[in-house]
Amino acid sequence: MAENQRILVCAGTGCASSGALPIIDILKEEIKRQGLEETVKVVGTGCQGFCEKGPTLVIEPQHILYTRVTKEDVQEIISQELIKGERVERLLLIDQTTQKPVSLMSDINFFSKQHRIVLHNCGVIDPQKITDYTERDGYKGIQKALKEMSPEEVMEEVKKSGLRGRGGAGFPTGLKWGFCRQTPSDKKYIICNADEGDPGAFMDRSVLEGDPHSVIEGMLIGAYAIGADEGYVYCRAEYPLAIKHLEIAIKQAEEAGYLGDNILGSGFSFRLNVFAGAGAFVCGEETALMASIEGKRGMPRVRPPFPAVSGLWGKPTNINNVETWSNIPHILRNGAEWYTQFGTEKSKGTKIFALTGKVNNTGLVEVPMGTTLREIIFDIGDGIQGGKKFKAVQIGGPSGGCLPEDMLDLAVDYDTLTQAGAMVGSGGLVIMDETTCMVDIARYFLNFSKKESCGKCTPCREGTTRMYEILDRITKGEGKEEDLDTLENLAYTIKETSLCGLGQFAPSPILATLKYFRHEYEAHIHDHKCPAHNCTALLSYTIDTEKCKMCSLCAKNCPTNCISGDKKTNTPYVIDEDKCIKCGTCMEKCKFGAISRA
Amino acid sequence: MEWLTLTIDGREVSVPKGTTVLDACRMNNIPIPTLCHAPELTSAGACRLCVVQIEGMRNLPPSCVTQAAQGMKVETQNPKVRQARKTILELLVANHPLDCMTCQKMGDCSLAEYAYDYGVTGEIYQGEKRCLPIDDSNPFILRDPNKCILCGKCIKACTEIQGKSILDFSFRGFDTQVGPAFNLPYKESDCDFCGSCVSVCPVGALTEKQMVGKGRPWEVSKVQTTCPFCGVGCNFDLNVKDGKVIGVTSNPEAPVNGKALCVKGRFGMDMIYSDNRVTTPLIRKNGELVPADWDEALDLVASKLGEIKKTYGPNSIAALSSAHCTNEENYLMQKFMRAVIGTNNIDHCART
């Protein structure tokens, strides 16, 4: 039995909802009961990233990964792994290529091919303990800034690092800070945008849950460089664990003298508040976010004036998102030069992606900018579920676009993706296989955008609903010849005339799918067929009387009793199209392959 | 003053620094359609109808919130700009009742004017349409949220001019509405019925209830006058049809008040034709008020006042003047009391 072991149990929102919390309690109890508490420590960590296989736990120092652990497995893990030092094979990850179990994280592509800077503490430390953070060089960045550097030097360092805003648009962070610093004012604010709302993206939540002090330290450094003495973290209320951990971290940082007046004897003071959002996607837009903090309706306003000139309560304000702030301590600690070794010429550092959809390994992955989509999806993500064929990847959530297979070798960075008609956005990667209908996907994202439109400007308010209606019609086989022209014209007008980013990028899923998958739209409209066999209104099921053995299994399982036939009277089995709800049960149940779908 | 030179539709124009592109265009008689813009209100940049193309700028910026800059090249009528405006109008009309024939705003409706200009029918984007209850709860303002184009001017007028903030947006996206808190009817809100919201509404969503059905804009002549209700001196337009006042509308050129009015000025015109209106002096004879002519009435007042003054002294008389009178009349009243009667017993209903 190894000395000084640690069991890191993922207690992020994903694993917690699949039952991680009782595992931690039982582990602690059992270890105490068996008298192992001197040598084995149980740590509830933030997100370890491998959400698909959760709850996950890691045995340190060997870095052995156990997946899909249940509380019933605790006994076996203790007796087998901790006492005998042998693996519990059934809880190990199965490599999809070799079909063999793998135990060490270094042998698992999902981990070994990542490069974790922002996530370096996530899943490793107890986020509720400031000492866990400081033991891993936490708060050394702000110490260095306050003791050795002037605010100008800090800003220069961030500029030199080439860090660009991780919230989506990729604006150079150092430059943004500079605008706010230059505006004379008796009061300045900095804000952390934690209103993460893209469907499928959860990296900001994970960082706040798993490493809240890194965000606080990043903001401290930013406030020092900009000359702000107060900050807000605007976190969506749907992230209660992130808010809880952040509040604990703020209290601890205050007690340790990292927040408050005269920090570390430097004369620099900074206070940090947490503000819970009220559930609007548009509040991720910076002017809407500030309106929300001010107690107004969360609606974007026209810029200029930019927040750097007139922001929160009319004061110069700098806003960056969680991931951006969390990069800062690393840049200060290790230097800009170190940071620039990662990434491409114009996009430095790493980016966290939330890998979801029809991919084997869903979860959070952090890779250097410039990594290809193929590496992310097929190496780290381990390919498509069920051996199906890859069709497209949606990047950047409802504001991004779908890219097809021939773009898989695209190096992921801000400029390349924008050129291809997608965007880095918040970093959501939704993987789609051959059974996904691209018209239906566009419809899905438009449904999201139309529901989240704030209603202020005409093109977004009215236009997103109309685009959705047209797409809905097409997926129901009611598309008209002129629909594609109408859709395209509307999409371009909304893109070019909307007030904020939500409206300007709402048509992106349509424009990208029209660009790369136009034939699917045409098949729906002209042939009344959905090539992916996804749109139920366009499906038809037929029974091949040659193959049918008249076993009646289809008829028995049909939920609407729309299949009739009789073996005794030799009446062939047929499907009543009018009654059929296209559920596909008959086809699944047929043992003779007699039922086909078209 | 610093001046800037920019090119609009190939024409060089000079405007003072700080001018918006919209104002630069309007100063030079270049028409730009707007729905959410009003000079007296802060610009929201919300309707997006005033978009133009500006060299070097991303997308189509709204001219109402874009500052003119030296050397700027602006195009206001090219096909791209006109197509974008047309699409925006199509979207608005598609979600707007087409009952123009009976709409009180017909003839004065900005949406109808631009739809005509841009050849918009509202047929392209047919789909879901709002179907909301009409607020008919009060005697002054008729609010039809189905006609609202959500330009937000009423909200700004209520907040920025009247300082009441009764109105705001509620709900999101396609379901967005404007109204008092909790979507209460006007009557149940803290609304003063100043009608500033009505005066800025570009469509038929907010109309003067008492004028509904009384006349079309082209049948009405507007007579500028000073409000008789108090001494502030607000100006407005009496809307006169066939020699009869049918209502009051704001006159944007009014020197004292602009478009702002109070409930009395805007909606108190019913007293003109009221049966209870006193049109001749009345003298009480044998306990009953009997109509009299002015000479008789004035003689009576003069003799009675003289008698009282003689018997009891000037300080036994006091006068209370009215905000209904003009400044000049109020001045004369106090002069009369001080110089003719010889007392300082003069007061005024609006003195606080």
Image: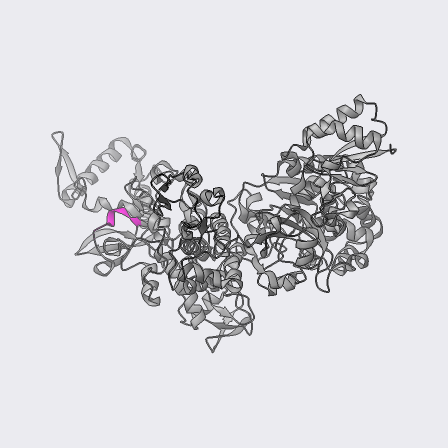
- Up-down: is B47 above or below B163? below
| Model colouring | one colour
**Is the N terminus of chain A in the top left, top right, bottom left or bottom right quadrant?**
top right
Which one is in front, B111 or B216?
A: B111
Image coordinates for residue B52, horizontal then vertical, percent: 47, 68
**B212 magenta-colored:** yes
Image coordinates for residue A2, horizontal then vertical, percent: 87, 34
Hey, which quadrant is residue A242 in on the image? top right
Image coordinates for residue A517, horizontal then vertical, percent: 51, 62
**A411 magenta-colored:** no
Which one is in front, A46 or A406?
A: A406
Which residue is pictured at 81% across the width and 40% down the height?
A134
Residue A459 is at least partly visible in this image: yes
**Is the C terminus of chain A in the top left, top right, bottom left or bottom right quadrant?**
bottom left
Q: Left or right? Give the position of A420 relative to A253.
A: left
Residue farthest to the right, as pictured: A3
Which residue is pictured at 80% across the width and 41% down the height?
A63
Q: Left or right? Give the position of A293 relative to A453.
A: right
- Up-down: is A471 above or below B342? below
**Residue range of the region highlighted in magenta in the rendering:** B207-214
Residue A127 is at least partly visible in this image: no
Image coordinates for residue B6, horizontal then vertical, percent: 52, 74
Which one is in front, A540 or B283?
A: A540
